[in-house]
Structures are given as structure tokens and as C-alpha cells.
Image: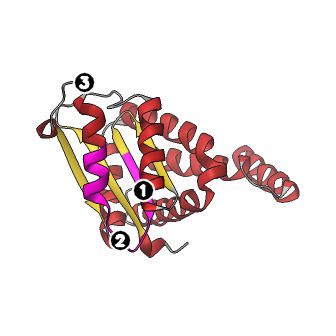
């Protein structure tokens, strides 16, 4: 899978609230519908800040995804005007959007902590099915975090995010010897 084909639709409530927009069951239904319609793997991350829907395609499916989401929320009496829907259909736009979100989060450590816990829980659940999409996301996150750190934005929140990525990679590594070596190296670094 090419990272340049990765697209994302981000949906958030216009009212500031840290809660799920739809239930996990509804997110699963949405994911299954989108996957069967566009015929490619879809990763839906239903977090406390909104819904992130990732897919790899040459075609932009923002309208389909947004309308599908709005159908689900319509039964709750919600309207389209209550949501902010942003589409990232090019790799530079996606990378810039993720970076802006992380920079904004750097001033909200509690919100970032909740987001990361929820995010990595969902990534863990979806890893077997979407390991290629998740690998692309990790690559993007690592590029952004390295860029932020090199621009003297060495924030403890960014370091926490990097540590979470490393732990997740170790946990999901299929090479047990490599997994053990990395774990030992990290342990020795933390002791020094």
C-alpha cells in the first residue's frame, strides 16, 4: 500500500465535548458498509475527539463517508450542521492536518492522554485486519513527531506519543527475537 493514496475523513462535533459521536457498534457498522461499498480496507477510529476514517484509494469517497455517518446520526435527531467534517485527500494535506492536531493537543495534556489511550486500544483491536493502514499511519506519525522535536517542540506529550508507538510496535512484532532485543534495549536506556 502506498502512503500517497491514504485518505482520511475526520468528523467532530462543533460543540466542544470529549465523548464518542457514535457508539462502537455504530462505528463498526459504518466501517463494514464503507468497506463493502468502496471495496478496500477501512480503518475507523472512534475516539473522544471525533471519528477518523482512513482508507487507501485513488478515489475520494468523502461524500459517501460523510453521508453514511449522517444517516447513522440522523436516528439520534442530529443534523449535519452540528458536525465539522474535514477531508484529507492528498498526502501533504493529511500530514499537515495530523500535525496541526498534535500541536493543538500539546496544550491539552489530559485530552491527549485520553485520546492516546483510546487510539491505541482501537489500533490494537484493528491491527490484524488493518496492519498495512496502521503501519502507514505510524510512519506518518513518526515523521511528524520527529519534525516537531527537531523544531524545538520537544514536548513531553510528543515523547509520550512516540513511546506509545514504540510499545505498540513491540507488542505487535511477529519476530520474537527482535521483540526481545528491542525490549531489552529500551529497558537499558531507561535505566541510564
Dot 1: element:
helix
As for residue 67 lying within the magenta part, the answer is yes
Q: Is residue 125 visible?
A: yes
- Residue at image mark 1: 37
The quadrant in which residue 61 appears is bottom left
Using residue 151 as the reference point, say whether residue 146 is left or right of it.
Answer: right
CA–CA distance in space, label 3 to label 2:
30 Å
- Residue at image mark 2: 59
Going 81% across and 50% down the picture, which residue do you hit?
184
The quadrant in which residue 21 appears is top left
Q: Are marks 2 and 1 in contact (CB under 8 Å)?
A: no
Crowd rating for badge 1 (residues with CA inside 10 Å; few <14, some 14–19, many 20+): few
* Residue at the outermost top position: 76
Using residue 7 as the reference point, say whether residue 13 is left or right of it.
Answer: left
As for residue 159 lying within the magenta part, the answer is no
Going 57% across and 36% down the picture, which residue do you hit?
121
Task: Give whichever of 189, 115 is nearer the camera.
Answer: 115
The segment highlighted magenta reads 52-68
Going 50% across and 47% down the picture, which residue do you hit?
161
Amino acid at each position: 500500500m502506498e502512503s500517497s493514496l491514504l485518505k482520511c475523513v475526520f468528523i467532530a462535533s462543533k460543540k466542544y465535548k470529549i465523548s464518542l459521536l457514535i457508539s462502537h457498534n455504530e462505528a463498526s457498522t459504518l466501517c463494514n458498509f464503507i468497506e463493502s461499498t468502496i471495496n478496500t480496507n477501512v480503518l475507523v477510529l472512534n475516539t473522544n475527539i471525533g471519528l477518523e476514517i482512513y482508507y487507501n484509494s485513488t478515489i475520494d469517497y468523502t461524500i459517501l463517508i460523510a453521508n453514511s455517518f449522517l444517516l447513522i446520526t440522523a436516528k439520534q435527531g442530529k443534523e449535519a450542521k452540528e458536525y465539522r467534517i474535514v477531508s484529507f485527500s492528498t498526502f501533504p494535506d493529511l500530514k499537515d492536518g495530523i500535525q496541526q492536531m498534535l500541536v493543538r493537543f500539546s496544550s491539552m495534556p489530559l485530552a491527549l492522554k485520553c485520546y492516546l489511550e483510546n487510539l491505541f486500544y482501537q489500533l490494537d483491536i484493528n491491527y490484524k485486519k488493518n496492519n498495512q493502514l496502521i503501519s502507514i499511519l505510524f510512519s506518518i506519525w513518526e515523521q511528524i513527531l520527529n519534525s516537531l522535536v527537531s523544531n524545538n517542540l520537544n514536548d513531553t506529550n510528543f515523547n509520550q506519543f512516540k513511546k506509545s508507538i514504540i510499545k505498540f510496535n513491540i507488542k505487535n512484532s511477529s519476530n520474537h527475537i527482535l521483540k526481545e532485543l528491542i525490549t531489552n534495549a529500551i529497558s537499558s536506556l531507561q535505566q541510564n
